[in-house]
Amino acid sequence: MDKVYSLLGLAARSRNVVSGEFATEKAVKTGKAVLVIVSGDASDNTVKKFSNMCGFYEVPMFQYGRKEELGHAMGKGERSSAAITDEGFAKTLKKHLEVSEE
């Protein structure tokens, strides 16, 4: 298991992450989301929706992993999106996500 999933698990246990499309969208629109992760196997519509929304609300968005892995890391079922609500977790996750994109 890599660093991103480990950090997601920690964030989930400390209640600093919301997951699922509806909860993620709400977090972004209410200004609670600091970072959004969308799974790499999410539908094109989902990716476009969050890409546009995150652009508008100026929230960094990354595509990473698969739905199954994303959900498993947070102790849930499949999840196509997650929003980190804590600055510290978001900053650390962002570093690891930027490295994984290279």
Image (spheres, rainbow, N blue to C red):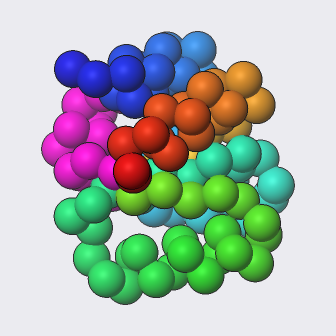
Q: In the image shown, does 1 or 67 lie closer to the viewer? A: 1
- The answer to whether any part of residue 20 appears in the image is no
Query: As displayed, is residue 70 above or below residue 4?
Result: below
Q: Quadrant of residue 18?
A: top right
Task: Give how far across and how far down residue 30 sits, in percent.
Answer: 80, 58
Q: Which residues are magenta?
A: 64-80
Residue at horizontal 72 percent and vertical 23 percent from the top: 88
Is 82 left or right of 90, judged from the image as shown? left
Can you tell which quarter of the image residue 72 is in? top left
Q: Nearer the viewer, residue 92 or 98?
A: 98
Q: Position of residue 48 (x, y in %)?
A: 46, 83
Residue that extends furthest to the front in the rendered view of this protein? 102
Q: Is residue 26 left or right of residue 65?
A: right
Height in image: 19 above or below 76? Answer: below
Q: Is residue 55 above or below residue 70?
A: below
Left or right of 9 on screen, residue 59? right
Q: Which residue lies at the image location 68% right of the left edge and 32% below the top edge?
A: 91
The residue positioned 57% from the left and 47% from the top of the image is 83
